[in-house]
Image (tube, grey):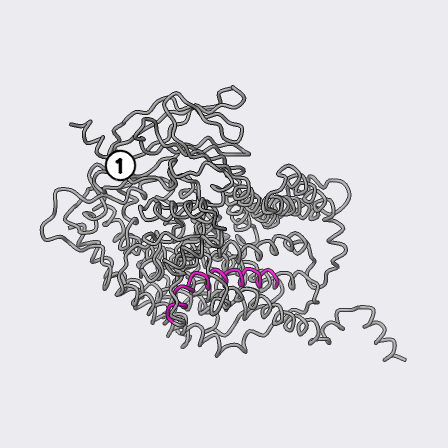
C-alpha cells in the first residue's frame, strides 16, 4: 500500500522546467531557444518565464519556440510569432515603442533631473554664505586687521 | 481561554495605542510634563500586551489548537515543532501580528533607551509611533483577526505551505519586518522633528542608529530570502525581480540613501529637508510593500492573501500617513535651513551623488514594478515587466555607484581635492583593472558582464582597504593604529567591501554559469564544467510529514572523488505539493548544484546540474554588508550619544 502511494505521488508530481526531451541537438540553436524563453512569460504563472516554469502551457510554448527555430526563423521572428498569438503580455522585457518609451526613459530622465537639481543646490551651498567662508580664513582676517589698523 | 486572552490583549493594546497617540502629543504641545511622561509607560504596556497576544497565538500553533481557523489553515500535527512556531507568521494574519509586535517593540526601545532625548521630542516620537501602531491594530482587528474560532473544529489542519517549511524561509519574514518596521521609527522621528520644528545635528545622530538597524535587518532579510530561493526553487535563481522582492528591495535602497544622508545632517547640518523627505518616503515604501504583498494588485509568487478589502484598508493607511507627513513637511520647510558650507568637490557633494543614484535606482525599480498597472489603466495595454527589463534598466546605476564609491568614500569634508584621493587609489585601480582584464582574457568572447563585475568587485574591496589604511595617518605604528580606529570606520570599509563582493558574485554567476539537463541511468555519469557527476542510486524515503525520492550522486574532479550529494524530491501529501531539495557542494570559488527530477519512461532519471561560479560571494557579501552595519551601529559615538551610559548595550534593536 505504502509503495502504491509513493508511486502515485511520484507520478502526480509536476514536471521540471526544461525537460531533457525538449533539448535540441544543435547546441547553438538550443542556446538561442533558452535566450528567447528567458524573455517570454508563462501566461498561467505568476511572473515566471517559460524557461523557469513547470506549467504545461510553458512547455508547449518552449516546444513552439524550438519548432520555429528549427524551421529557420531568426530570434526576432520567433518572438514576433509568439507575440502575434498571445499579445505583448508575454514579453518580460517590454518593447520601448509608444507609451513604453516613458518606462525606459524614466530612469535616465530622473537621473538627469536629479543631477541638475543637485548641481544647483551644491552651487548654492558653495556660494551663499561667503561671509562665513571669509571668516574661516585666518590669513584674510589678519590682512583685514592690518588694513583697518592702518 | 488563552486564545480569548490573546484576543483581549490585542484589543487592549489598540486602546493603549490610541491613548498614546493623543495624550503625549497634547502634552508636548502644552508643555505639560505629566502628559508627556505618559508616553513611556504606555509604550511599555503596549508592547507587553502585544507580546502577550502574540504568545497566545504561538501557543495555539504549538498545541495545534484546530478550533482556531488560522491554525487549521496553516498547521498540522505532523509538522516539526520549528515549523509549527514559524507557521505563526507564515500566513497573512499572523504576520500582521508579528508586524505590529515589532512596531510596539521599536516604540518600547525609544521609551527604554532614549534617556537623552529631549522630553518633548520623545513624547512626539512615541505618539507618532503609536499612531502607526493604532492603524495596524485596527487593520488586524477589523480585517485580519487571527483569533477567529471555528464552529466545528476539524481533526487535523491543512498544513503550512511546504515551501515555507525551510529554515532559510522560516526566519526571512521576521528579519524583513524588523527592517520594514524599523523604518517606521525613522518616520516617527522625522514627523516628530517636523512637529517640533527642529532638525539639527543631534536629530541626525538620534535617528541614524534606527536607520542603520532597519537597514541591517533588511539586508539580512533580503539575503535570507534570496539564499532560500537559490537552493530551494530547483534551478539556482537568486533574484527574480518579482513585485514582492522589489517591495523589499525599494526600502533597502532608500534606507541605504537615508543612512548616508543622515551622516551629512549629523556632521554638517546640511541636506536636512532631503533627509526628512527620505525618512518619510522610506516608510512609505515599506507600506507600499505591505500593500503589494497583501492586496494581490500585482500578481506575484508571494502574494499572501488576495483580498481587495484588506488592500483598500492598507492603501488607506499608507495614503493617510504619507499625505499627513508630506503636508507637514511642506508646511515646515523653513525650519530646515542648511548650515554647513561646502564646495562642489567635497564629501558632502559625493554623498549627494550617492543619494541621487540610490534614489533613482529605487525609482526605476518602482516604475518597473508599477508599470503593468499604469499601462493598463492609462494606455489600455496589458503587458509584463520582468527580469530582463530590470537587469537592463537597473544595473547601470549600480555600476555607476560602484565606480564612484571608492573615490567618494575617501573625499574630505567641506573641500576636497580629487587628485589626492585618486593618487592614493591608483594601486587599487590597477589591481582591479588587472583582475578584470584577466577575466576577459580567460573567458574569450563572451559578454562583458563577468569581467566588469570582477573589476567592480576588486575596485570596491581594494578601495575599502586603501580607505581604512589611509585613516591610520603617517609614519610608524600604522598597524597598531589600525586596530584602534573607530568601529564606524571599520563598519564603512567592511560594508563597502561587502557590496563589492556581492557585485562580483552576481556578475560571475550570471556570466559564467553552466547548466546540464539530461536523462541519467543509475551508474552513468555526466560532466559539467570539468567536474564529473555519477548517479549511484535512487530510493524512496519517508519524512515526518512528507515522502521523498532521494538520490545519491558522487562528485569528482580529475578522477578524484570530492563528495557525495543527495538531492531530494519531496511530496507533502496534506498540502498536495511537491518541492525540490537541491544538493549543493559549496566551494569558495564555485557551487555544484544537482537536482533530481522525474523517472523517465525508458528508465533513468531526469537530472539537472549546474556549475555556479562565485555563488557564495553573493551572500558572503550580504553578510559583510550587515556586519559592516553592525560594526557601525556599535560605534562608541552612538553608545555615548544614545544616552545609554547606564545601559552598555546601547542601541536597542540589536
Q: Is residue B576 magenta?
A: no
Comparing B22 with B157, the one in front is B157
The image position of residue B390, as x and y in percent, is: 49, 56
Comparing B246 with B117, the one in front is B246
Write down the quadrant of residue B601 in the picture. top left
Q: Chain of mark 1?
A: B
Which residues fall within the magenta stretch? B353-377
**Mark 1 residue crowding within 10 angstroms, few (<14) / some (14–19) / many (20+):** many
Horizontal side, residue B440 vs residue B207: left or right: right
Tell me the residue at 23%/47% (across/down).
B74
The image position of residue B109, as x and y in percent, is: 41, 56
Q: Is residue B112 visible?
A: no
Q: Is residue B96 visible?
A: yes
Residue identifier under label 1: B571
Tell me the residue at 18%/28% (across/down).
A2
Q: Is residue B375 magenta?
A: yes
Write down the quadrant of residue B75 in the picture. top left
Amino acid at each position: 500500500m505504502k509503495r502504491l502511494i509513493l508511486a502515485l505521488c511520484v507520478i502526480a508530481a509536476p514536471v521540471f522546467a526544461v525537460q531533457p526531451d525538449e533539448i535540441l541537438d544543435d547546441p547553438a540553436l538550443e542556446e538561442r531557444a533558452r535566450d528567447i524563453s528567458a524573455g517570454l512569460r508563462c501566461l498561467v504563472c505568476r511572473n515566471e518565464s517559460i524557461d523557469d516554469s513547470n506549467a504545461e502551457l510553458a512547455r508547449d510554448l518552449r516546444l513552439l519556440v524550438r519548432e520555429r527555430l528549427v524551421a529557420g526563423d531568426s530570434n526576432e521572428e520567433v518572438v514576433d510569432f509568439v507575440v502575434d498569438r498571445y499579445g505583448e503580455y508575454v514579453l518580460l522585457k517590454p518593447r520601448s515603442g509608444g507609451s513604453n518609451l516613458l518606462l525606459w526613459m524614466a530612469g535616465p530622465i530622473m537621473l538627469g533631473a536629479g543631477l541638475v537639481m543637485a548641481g544647483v543646490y551644491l552651487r548654492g551651498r558653495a556660494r551663499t554664505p561667503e561671509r562665513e567662508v571669509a571668516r574661516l580664513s585666518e590669513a584674510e582676517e589678519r590682512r583685514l586687521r592690518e588694513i583697518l589698523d592702518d | 481561554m488563552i486564545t480569548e486572552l490573546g484576543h483581549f490583549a490585542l484589543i487592549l493594546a489598540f486602546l493603549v495605542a490610541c491613548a498614546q497617540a493623543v495624550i503625549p502629543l497634547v502634552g508636548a504641545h502644552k508643555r505639560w510634563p505629566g502628559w508627556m511622561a505618559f508616553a513611556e509607560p504606555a509604550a511599555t504596556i503596549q508592547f507587553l500586551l502585544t507580546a502577550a497576544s502574540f504568545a497566545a497565538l504561538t501557543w495555539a500553533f504549538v498545541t495545534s489548537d484546530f478550533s482556531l481557523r488560522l491554525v487549521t489553515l496553516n498547521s498540522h500535527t505532523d509538522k516539526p515543532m520549528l515549523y509549527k512556531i514559524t507557521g505563526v507568521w507564515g500566513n497573512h494574519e499572523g504576520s500582521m501580528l508579528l508586524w505590529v509586535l515589532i512596531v510596539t517593540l521599536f516604540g518600547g526601545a525609544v521609551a527604554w533607551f532614549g534617556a537623552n532625548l529631549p522630553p518633548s521630542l520623545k513624547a512626539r516620537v512615541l505618539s507618532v509611533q503609536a499612531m502607526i501602531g493604532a492603524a495596524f491594530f485596527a487593520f488586524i482587528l477589523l480585517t485580519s483577526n487571527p483569533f477567529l474560532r471555528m464552529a466545528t473544529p476539524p481533526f487535523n489542519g491543512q498544513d503550512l505551505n511546504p515551501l515555507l517549511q525551510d529554515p532559510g524561509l522560516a526566519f526571512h519574514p521576521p528579519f524583513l519586518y524588523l527592517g520594514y518596521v524599523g523604518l517606521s521609527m525613522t518616520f516617527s522621528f522625522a514627523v516628530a522633528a517636523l512637529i517640533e520644528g527642529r532638525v539639527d545635528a543631534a536629530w541626525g545622530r538620534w535617528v541614524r542608529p534606527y536607520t542603520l538597524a532597519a537597514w541591517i535587518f533588511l539586508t539580512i532579510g533580503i539575503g535570507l530570502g534570496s539564499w532560500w530561493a537559490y537552493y530551494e526553487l530547483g534551478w539556482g535563481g537568486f533574484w527574480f525581480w518579482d513585485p514582492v522582492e522589489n517591495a523589499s528591495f525599494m526600502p533597502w535602497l532608500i534606507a541605504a540613501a537615508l543612512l548616508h544622508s543622515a551622516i551629512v545632517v549629523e556632521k554638517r547640518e546640511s541636506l536636512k529637508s532631503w533627509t526628512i523627505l527620505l525618512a518619510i518616503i522610506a516608510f512609505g515604501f515599506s507600506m507600499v510593500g505591505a500593500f503589494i504583498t497583501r492586496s494581490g494588485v500585482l500578481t506575484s509568487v508571494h502574494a499572501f492573501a488576495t483580498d481587495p478589502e484588506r488592500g483598500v484598508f492598507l492603501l488607506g493607511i499608507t495614503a493617510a500617513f504619507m499625505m499627513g507627513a508630506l503636508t507637514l513637511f511642506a508646511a515646515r520647510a523653513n525650519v530646515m535651513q542648511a548650515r554647513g558650507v561646502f564646495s562642489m568637490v567635497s564629501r558632502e557633494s559625493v554623498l549627494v551623488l550617492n543619494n541621487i543614484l540610490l534614489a533613482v535606482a529605487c525609482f526605476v525599480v518602482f516604475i518597473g514594478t508599477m508599470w503593468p498597472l499604469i499601462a493598463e489603466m492609462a494606455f489600455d495595454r496589458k503587458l509584463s515587466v520582468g527580469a530582463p527589463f530590470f537587469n537592463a534598466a537597473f544595473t547601470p546605476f549600480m555600476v555607476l555607484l560602484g565606480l564612484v564609491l571608492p573615490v567618494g568614500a575617501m573625499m574630505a569634508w567641506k573641500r576636497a581635492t580629487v587628485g589626492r584621493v585618486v593618487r592614493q587609489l591608483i594601486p587599487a585601480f590597477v589591481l582591479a583593472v588587472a583582475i578584470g582584464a584577466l577575466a576577459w582574457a580567460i573567458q574569450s568572447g563572451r559578454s562583458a558582464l563577468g569581467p566588469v563585475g570582477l573589476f567592480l568587485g576588486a575596485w570596491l574591496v581594494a578601495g575599502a582597504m586603501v580607505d581604512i589604511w589611509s585613516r591610520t595617518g603617517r609614519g610608524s605604528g600604522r598597524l597598531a593604529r589600525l586596530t584602534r580606529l573607530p568601529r564606524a570606520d571599520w563598519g564603512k570599509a567592511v560594508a563597502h567591501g561587502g557590496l563589492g563582493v556581492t557585485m562580483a558574485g552576481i556578475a560571475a554567476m550570471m556570466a559564467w554559469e553552466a547548466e546540464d539537463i539530461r536523462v541519467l541511468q543509475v551508474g552513468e555519469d555526466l560532466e559539467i564544467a570539468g567536474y564529473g557527476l555519477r548517479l549511484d542510486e535512487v530510493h524512496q524515503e519517508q519524512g515526518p510529514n512528507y515522502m521523498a525520492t532521494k538520490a545519491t550522486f558522487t562528485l569528482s574532479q580529475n578522477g578524484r572523488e570530492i563528495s557525495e550529494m543527495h538531492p531530494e524530491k519531496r511530496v507533502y501529501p496534506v498540502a498536495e505539493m511537491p518541492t525540490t531539495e537541491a544538493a549543493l557542494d559549496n566551494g569558495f570559488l564555485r557551487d555544484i548544484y544537482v537536482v533530481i527530477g522525474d523517472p523517465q519512461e525508458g528508465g533513468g532519471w531526469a537530472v539537472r546540474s549546474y556549475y555556479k561560479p562565485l555563488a557564495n560571494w553573493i551572500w558572503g557579501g550580504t553578510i559583510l554588508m550587515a556586519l559592516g552595519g553592525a560594526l557601525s551601529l556599535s560605534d562608541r559615538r552612538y553608545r555615548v550619544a544614545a544616552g545609554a551610559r547606564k545601559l552598555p548595550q546601547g542601541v536597542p534593536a540589536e
